[in-house]
Amino acid sequence: MMWHHHPRLVDLLAGEYALGTLQGGARRRFEKLLARRPDLAEAVARWNERMAPVLLALPPQTPAPGTWRAIEQRLGLQAPAAPMAWWRRLLQPAPAGALELGLLVGVMLPSLWQAQHGVPDTPASTQLPESYVGVLGLADGRPGLVVSSLRQGRTVDIKRVAAVPVPPGQVLYLWSLDASGQASPVAPLPQGPFVHLQLGAPAETVFAKAVELAVSLERKDASPQAPSGAYVYRGLCGKLWRVP
Protein backbone atom coordinates (compact mmCIF):
# COMPACT_ATOMS: atom_id res chain seq x y z
CA MET A 1 0.00 0.00 0.00
CA MET A 2 1.29 3.46 -0.94
CA TRP A 3 1.94 5.71 2.06
CA HIS A 4 -0.69 8.28 0.98
CA HIS A 5 -3.40 5.60 1.22
CA HIS A 6 -2.57 4.91 4.88
CA PRO A 7 -4.53 7.39 7.08
CA ARG A 8 -2.26 7.07 10.13
CA LEU A 9 0.90 7.74 8.11
CA VAL A 10 -0.75 10.64 6.27
CA ASP A 11 -1.65 12.20 9.64
CA LEU A 12 1.89 11.81 10.99
CA LEU A 13 3.48 13.30 7.86
CA ALA A 14 0.96 16.17 7.85
CA GLY A 15 1.96 16.94 11.44
CA GLU A 16 5.66 16.99 10.55
CA TYR A 17 4.93 19.16 7.51
CA ALA A 18 2.93 21.69 9.57
CA LEU A 19 5.61 21.74 12.27
CA GLY A 20 8.39 22.17 9.69
CA THR A 21 10.33 19.02 10.58
CA LEU A 22 9.58 17.22 7.31
CA GLN A 23 12.64 17.97 5.21
CA GLY A 24 14.44 17.10 1.98
CA GLY A 25 12.98 14.74 -0.59
CA ALA A 26 10.21 13.62 1.74
CA ARG A 27 8.91 17.20 2.00
CA ARG A 28 9.13 17.72 -1.77
CA ARG A 29 7.21 14.51 -2.44
CA PHE A 30 4.59 15.49 0.15
CA GLU A 31 4.15 18.95 -1.41
CA LYS A 32 3.89 17.48 -4.92
CA LEU A 33 1.02 15.23 -3.81
CA LEU A 34 -0.50 18.03 -1.71
CA ALA A 35 -1.46 19.93 -4.86
CA ARG A 36 -3.65 17.02 -6.01
CA ARG A 37 -5.05 15.72 -2.73
CA PRO A 38 -7.45 17.96 -0.76
CA ASP A 39 -7.47 15.39 2.05
CA LEU A 40 -3.76 16.06 2.65
CA ALA A 41 -4.45 19.81 2.81
CA GLU A 42 -7.20 19.16 5.35
CA ALA A 43 -4.84 16.99 7.43
CA VAL A 44 -2.25 19.81 7.52
CA ALA A 45 -4.99 22.33 8.41
CA ARG A 46 -6.09 20.12 11.33
CA TRP A 47 -2.52 20.05 12.66
CA ASN A 48 -2.28 23.83 12.35
CA GLU A 49 -5.44 24.15 14.46
CA ARG A 50 -4.08 21.71 17.07
CA MET A 51 -0.83 23.65 17.41
CA ALA A 52 -2.45 27.09 17.51
CA PRO A 53 -2.98 27.21 21.34
CA VAL A 54 0.66 26.25 21.94
CA LEU A 55 1.95 28.81 19.45
CA LEU A 56 -0.25 31.54 20.92
CA ALA A 57 1.30 30.88 24.33
CA LEU A 58 4.86 31.43 23.06
CA PRO A 59 6.42 34.86 23.68
CA PRO A 60 7.04 37.03 20.57
CA GLN A 61 10.49 36.67 19.03
CA THR A 62 12.38 39.28 17.03
CA PRO A 63 13.98 37.75 13.90
CA ALA A 64 17.73 38.08 13.62
CA PRO A 65 19.05 40.51 10.97
CA GLY A 66 19.05 38.86 7.58
CA THR A 67 16.32 36.33 8.41
CA TRP A 68 13.89 37.61 5.76
CA ARG A 69 16.72 37.78 3.23
CA ALA A 70 17.58 34.14 3.94
CA ILE A 71 13.91 33.13 3.54
CA GLU A 72 13.71 34.91 0.18
CA GLN A 73 16.89 33.18 -0.99
CA ARG A 74 15.54 29.76 0.05
CA LEU A 75 12.33 30.48 -1.90
CA GLY A 76 14.37 31.45 -4.96
CA LEU A 77 12.97 34.97 -5.25
CA GLN A 78 14.89 37.46 -7.40
CA ALA A 79 15.93 40.96 -6.35
CA PRO A 80 13.88 41.32 -3.15
CA ALA A 81 12.71 44.92 -2.83
CA ALA A 82 11.57 44.82 0.79
CA PRO A 83 11.82 42.50 3.84
CA MET A 84 8.25 41.22 3.33
CA ALA A 85 8.45 40.91 -0.48
CA TRP A 86 7.95 37.14 -0.33
CA TRP A 87 4.32 37.73 0.81
CA ARG A 88 3.54 39.36 -2.53
CA ARG A 89 4.29 36.09 -4.32
CA LEU A 90 1.45 34.47 -2.36
CA LEU A 91 -1.00 37.13 -3.53
CA GLN A 92 -0.64 36.36 -7.24
CA PRO A 93 -3.55 34.63 -9.01
CA ALA A 94 -1.25 31.88 -10.28
CA PRO A 95 -1.06 28.79 -7.98
CA ALA A 96 1.42 29.37 -5.19
CA GLY A 97 1.76 26.89 -2.30
CA ALA A 98 -1.66 27.04 -0.68
CA LEU A 99 -0.30 26.17 2.75
CA GLU A 100 2.70 28.50 3.02
CA LEU A 101 0.32 30.75 5.00
CA GLY A 102 -1.17 27.85 6.94
CA LEU A 103 0.89 28.14 10.10
CA LEU A 104 0.32 31.88 10.32
CA VAL A 105 -3.43 31.52 9.86
CA GLY A 106 -3.54 28.66 12.36
CA VAL A 107 -2.10 31.03 14.95
CA MET A 108 -4.27 34.01 13.99
CA LEU A 109 -7.59 32.22 13.54
CA PRO A 110 -8.64 31.57 17.18
CA SER A 111 -7.82 35.04 18.46
CA LEU A 112 -9.38 36.85 15.48
CA TRP A 113 -12.56 34.78 15.71
CA GLN A 114 -12.87 35.65 19.41
CA ALA A 115 -12.19 39.32 18.67
CA GLN A 116 -14.84 39.33 15.94
CA HIS A 117 -17.57 37.79 18.09
CA GLY A 118 -16.55 39.15 21.50
CA VAL A 119 -16.14 35.64 22.91
CA PRO A 120 -14.05 35.23 26.11
CA ASP A 121 -10.98 33.01 25.86
CA THR A 122 -12.25 30.00 27.83
CA PRO A 123 -12.42 26.30 26.94
CA ALA A 124 -16.23 26.37 26.83
CA SER A 125 -16.24 29.26 24.33
CA THR A 126 -14.28 27.31 21.69
CA GLN A 127 -17.26 25.04 20.88
CA LEU A 128 -18.36 26.91 17.75
CA PRO A 129 -21.00 25.75 15.26
CA GLU A 130 -19.76 24.01 12.11
CA SER A 131 -18.46 26.85 9.96
CA TYR A 132 -16.08 27.93 7.22
CA VAL A 133 -13.66 30.62 8.41
CA GLY A 134 -10.97 32.44 6.46
CA VAL A 135 -8.35 34.93 7.67
CA LEU A 136 -7.09 36.82 4.63
CA GLY A 137 -3.85 38.78 4.69
CA LEU A 138 -2.57 41.85 2.88
CA ALA A 139 0.59 41.93 0.78
CA ASP A 140 2.65 43.09 3.78
CA GLY A 141 1.47 40.19 5.95
CA ARG A 142 -1.05 42.07 8.08
CA PRO A 143 -4.50 40.51 8.56
CA GLY A 144 -6.99 42.19 6.24
CA LEU A 145 -10.33 40.34 6.25
CA VAL A 146 -12.10 37.78 8.42
CA VAL A 147 -14.61 35.76 6.35
CA SER A 148 -17.03 33.31 7.97
CA SER A 149 -20.16 31.33 7.16
CA LEU A 150 -22.12 28.52 8.78
CA ARG A 151 -21.51 25.22 7.03
CA GLN A 152 -25.13 24.91 5.88
CA GLY A 153 -25.78 28.67 5.76
CA ARG A 154 -26.22 31.02 2.83
CA THR A 155 -24.87 34.17 4.51
CA VAL A 156 -21.19 35.11 4.60
CA ASP A 157 -20.03 37.60 7.25
CA ILE A 158 -17.04 39.74 6.27
CA LYS A 159 -15.16 41.78 8.86
CA ARG A 160 -12.69 44.28 7.41
CA VAL A 161 -9.57 44.49 9.57
CA ALA A 162 -7.57 46.61 7.11
CA ALA A 163 -8.94 48.37 4.04
CA VAL A 164 -7.44 48.57 0.56
CA PRO A 165 -8.19 51.36 -1.95
CA VAL A 166 -10.91 50.48 -4.47
CA PRO A 167 -10.68 52.57 -7.67
CA PRO A 168 -13.88 54.03 -9.18
CA GLY A 169 -15.71 51.53 -11.35
CA GLN A 170 -14.24 48.52 -9.54
CA VAL A 171 -15.32 46.24 -6.71
CA LEU A 172 -13.68 43.71 -4.40
CA TYR A 173 -14.46 40.18 -5.63
CA LEU A 174 -14.30 37.01 -3.51
CA TRP A 175 -12.76 33.78 -4.89
CA SER A 176 -12.58 30.21 -3.61
CA LEU A 177 -9.24 28.47 -4.29
CA ASP A 178 -8.83 24.69 -4.34
CA ALA A 179 -5.69 22.74 -3.42
CA SER A 180 -4.14 23.32 -6.86
CA GLY A 181 -4.71 27.09 -6.67
CA GLN A 182 -7.57 27.06 -9.20
CA ALA A 183 -9.91 30.01 -8.49
CA SER A 184 -13.72 29.77 -8.60
CA PRO A 185 -15.82 32.98 -8.46
CA VAL A 186 -18.03 33.52 -5.40
CA ALA A 187 -19.44 37.07 -5.50
CA PRO A 188 -18.57 40.79 -5.26
CA LEU A 189 -18.12 42.08 -1.71
CA PRO A 190 -20.16 44.98 -0.32
CA GLN A 191 -18.14 47.89 1.04
CA GLY A 192 -17.99 48.45 4.79
CA PRO A 193 -16.19 47.44 7.98
CA PHE A 194 -18.67 44.60 8.71
CA VAL A 195 -20.91 43.42 5.89
CA HIS A 196 -22.91 40.38 4.81
CA LEU A 197 -22.91 38.53 1.50
CA GLN A 198 -25.79 36.28 0.40
CA LEU A 199 -24.82 33.06 -1.39
CA GLY A 200 -26.87 31.44 -4.14
CA ALA A 201 -26.24 28.00 -2.59
CA PRO A 202 -25.28 26.67 0.87
CA ALA A 203 -21.70 27.38 1.96
CA GLU A 204 -21.11 23.61 1.99
CA THR A 205 -21.54 23.68 -1.80
CA VAL A 206 -19.74 26.96 -2.54
CA PHE A 207 -16.67 26.29 -0.36
CA ALA A 208 -16.55 22.47 -0.48
CA LYS A 209 -13.16 22.38 -2.27
CA ALA A 210 -11.75 25.59 -0.80
CA VAL A 211 -8.41 25.49 0.97
CA GLU A 212 -7.94 29.24 0.47
CA LEU A 213 -10.03 32.35 -0.07
CA ALA A 214 -8.83 35.38 -2.01
CA VAL A 215 -10.08 38.79 -3.11
CA SER A 216 -9.20 40.67 -6.29
CA LEU A 217 -10.25 43.98 -7.82
CA GLU A 218 -12.69 43.50 -10.69
CA ARG A 219 -14.79 45.73 -12.93
CA LYS A 220 -18.14 46.65 -11.41
CA ASP A 221 -21.12 44.68 -12.79
CA ALA A 222 -18.77 42.14 -14.41
CA SER A 223 -19.09 38.35 -13.96
CA PRO A 224 -15.43 37.27 -14.04
CA GLN A 225 -14.52 33.60 -14.38
CA ALA A 226 -10.87 34.20 -13.45
CA PRO A 227 -9.06 36.98 -11.53
CA SER A 228 -8.02 39.84 -13.79
CA GLY A 229 -5.02 40.77 -11.62
CA ALA A 230 -3.15 40.14 -8.39
CA TYR A 231 -5.08 39.34 -5.24
CA VAL A 232 -5.33 42.15 -2.69
CA TYR A 233 -6.32 39.74 0.11
CA ARG A 234 -5.53 36.02 0.41
CA GLY A 235 -5.53 33.40 3.17
CA LEU A 236 -6.37 29.89 4.28
CA CYS A 237 -9.99 28.71 4.46
CA GLY A 238 -10.55 26.59 7.59
CA LYS A 239 -13.33 24.06 8.17
CA LEU A 240 -14.37 24.29 11.83
CA TRP A 241 -15.66 20.76 12.32
CA ARG A 242 -14.17 17.32 12.75
CA VAL A 243 -13.05 16.08 9.32
CA PRO A 244 -13.18 12.25 8.97
Image (cartoon, rainbow, N blue to C red):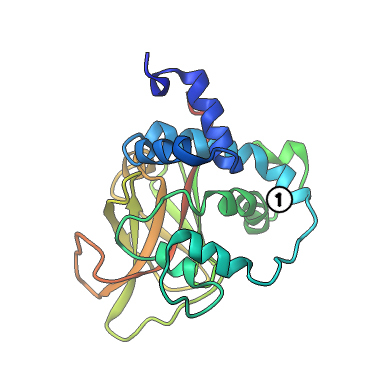
Q: Is residue 66 above or below residue 57?
A: below
Give the percent coordinates (x, y) of residue 36: 31, 37
Q: How many marks?
A: 1
In which quarter of the view is residue 222 placed? Answer: bottom left
Which one is nearer the viewer's eye here, 59 or 168? 59
- The answer to whether residue 106 is left or right of residue 10 is right
Which one is nearer the viewer's eye here, 169 or 43? 43
What SS does tag 1 mark? Answer: loop
| Residue occupying the point 74% across, 43% down | 54
Amino acid type at mark 1: Val
Where does label 1 land, which residue?
Answer: 119
- The answer to whether residue 120 is left or right of residue 27 is right
Q: Is residue 224 above or below residue 33?
A: below
Outermost residue, top direction?
1
Q: Quadrant of the N terminus?
A: top left
Which one is nearer the viewer's eye here, 10 or 145? 10
Which one is nearer the viewer's eye here, 111 or 69? 69
Give the percent coordinates (x, y) of residue 158: 48, 61
Residue neighbourhood size for the residue with mark 1, other residues' Cα within 10 Å, grouped as few (<14), some (14–19), many (≥20): few
| Residue occupying the point 50% across, 76% down | 163
Visible residue check, residue 142: no
Visible residue check, residue 69: yes
- The answer to whether residue 96 is left or right of residue 219 is right
In which quarter of the view is residue 211 placed? Answer: top left
Give the percent coordinates (x, y) of residue 65: 68, 72
In which quarter of the view is residue 167 placed? Answer: bottom left
| Residue occupying the point 29% across, 79% down | 170
Q: Is residue 175 above or below residue 222?
A: above
Give the percent coordinates (x, y) of residue 184: 27, 52
